Image (cartoon, rainbow, N blue to C red):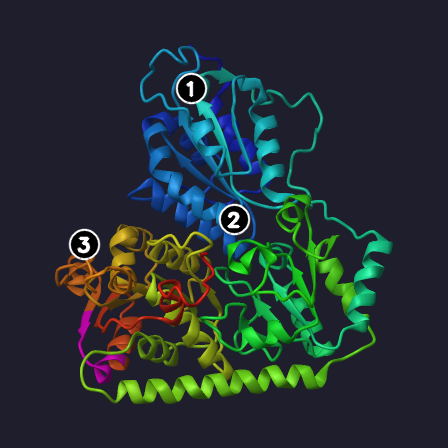
Amino acid sequence: MTDSKMIRGGALLARALKEKGVDHVFTLAGGFCNPALEGFMECQMPVINTPHEQIAGHLADGHARITRKPVVCLVGPEGFANAVPAMLEAGGERSPVIFVTGSSTLKRQGAGGFKEIDDVAIAAPLVKYSAQITDGERISEFVNRAWTAATTGYPGPVHISLPVDIMFSSFAPDAGLDERPFNRTDRPAPRAWPDPTALGVVLEKVNNAKRPVIIGGHGVWWSKSEDKLEQVGKALRLPIFNVPYHSKLLGEECEAYMGLADFHQYHPSKPAIHEADLVLMIGGRLDNQMNFGNPPFFTKDQTLVCINGSHEELEYNQAADEVLLCDPGAFLKALSGVGKMWPEWFDLQRTRRAAWVDEWYAHIEAESAKPGKMHPLQLSLDVQEQMGDNDWLIFDGGNTHFWSEIAVNMAGWRGQKLGGIMHPGNYSLLGVGVSFGVSAKALHPNRNVVVISGDGAFLSGGLSIESAFQDNLPITIVIDNNGGLDCISQQQERLFANGKHFATDFRDIPFHAMCEGLGGHGELVETRDQLAPALQRAMASGKTAIVNVKCRGVISPIVAATSDKRDKASIE
């Protein structure tokens, strides 16, 4: 009989994560993970069971993006394979998810054990740290190592593999705690402070600049410096742009925020960036979205400075004219002391944004006057009109995502405030929207959460709607239903010699009836005048709801650019 003072390896794992401050675990319960689940139960740690491991990963990712602290996704060996896409998505957005695999037996490793998979090697390219625990006495140590990797420098997901024989074996409750660090609770992550000389060089360039702009990236968000960014923009009259494919650093209604640094989704960013003599890229990477720092996105005549809080980021930014290793918050504090303002340059960008917004409103007014199905841009604008200042908006899909990006900028300029915005990240992974919506609702239960999803995106990840029902987290899902993978269809029609599309159509799927069958609220919307009352009823129902909106397929500016060889696009 097992000594009552001994506990299983899974319980050691749970206790180590609890000590670090993890407050939620997302999983699809499996036999390999049972000791850890028992440990979480004894620790009174909330465990959210989901219908699929990929959904568990996306829910964990959404939770981590909002809270900006690590969270756990626990899966079995075969479930690990299902969770790989969630690792990819979390890695692209630097989300500190701790993926834990209950893996095949260590004793017979390499001999064809039950559900044996080389999870450590598979995860390694997708995460910051991937390791297998081979000694139960070191479970707490490996949790500490993984936590440190997830939260320091360039944050991101990590992976721990705990073999099933160690998971079930018994150990002393204080196993491995007789070595430093004796205190294994969460500690503030170390931050890079600037070399005074290097900082002085950058600030001198700022003082000498006539037309500076800021492009804010992920590092600003993860260093919790977005308030400082807004203050600098307002005080110095510095125009601020956001890298694409990341949760917004500033509200769309913020005076200093202009829009995405994307020439196709926000056209005025092109003259602003091309005319700038100094570009300060803070917490971002010179990747494909920034054309790797090269013309024609950035010009040869301007100075490009990258400020990053970790050496990992700076490795991506070798194309910059100047680099500065510095926590974004520390740099923004130093920047706020620059005794200079750029009001005329700042006002020019606001004038351009105003003109752009007016042009789009005139365009959509003409488009919406046409008979037939709704325009996807009009759909997103009308959805926002039904939302309050603290409500969360999530969008997911191809064209659905891109049109919603334009819509939130338009509505924000005219005063629309939102509590938060989430969408697919750097890899444009479809199917994350509903999971992110559930994550937002779990953390903000008293706010409306609305997901605008393309029909293809919903089919990719819509099974996560069950988590909304299971945990009584009612969200409203608006389906931009154009009957297929419209983003791909439109590219094919421009690419294929016969001008047709192929293998991208769906049948007429009754998404609203599907939701009703699960116990939710569902409505079909076929004309624009039906949308607002349907949304109001859905949000007032107190149930998870789907509003199935028949929209027409309209090519978005970025898809038009990526499929037009005459115009350089961010994916090239």
Q: List the residue tagged with mark 3.
A: 503
Q: List the residue tagged with mark 2.
A: 95
Q: Earlier in the sequence, mark 2 or mark 3?
A: 2
Q: Is residue 524 magenta?
A: yes
Answer yes or no: is residue 448 visible. no
Which is closer to the viewer, label 2 or label 1? 2
Q: Which mark is residue 168?
A: 1
| Pointer 2 with pointer 1, Cβ within 8 A | no
Q: Earlier in the sequence, mark 1 or mark 3?
A: 1
For image coordinates 64% across by 86% down, the residue present is 347
For image coordinates 41% across by 67% down, the residue present is 566
Q: Is residue 113 magenta?
A: no
Q: Give the amino acid at mark 1.
A: Phe
Q: Is residue 218 above or below residue 251?
A: above
Q: Is residue 246 above or below residue 38?
A: below
Q: Position of residue 256 (x, y in %)?
A: 62, 77
Task: Give the spatial CA distance, label 2 vs label 3.
Answer: 34 Å
Query: In the depicted view, which residue is nearer to us: 453 or 74?
Result: 453
Q: Residues in magenta? A: 523-531
Task: Give the spatial CA distance, label 1 vs label 3.
Answer: 48 Å
Q: Earlier in the sequence, mark 2 or mark 1?
A: 2
Residue lying furthest left = 507
> Is 80 positioned to the left or the right of 95 in the image?
left
Instruction: Determine which quarter of the picture holds residue 440.
Output: bottom left
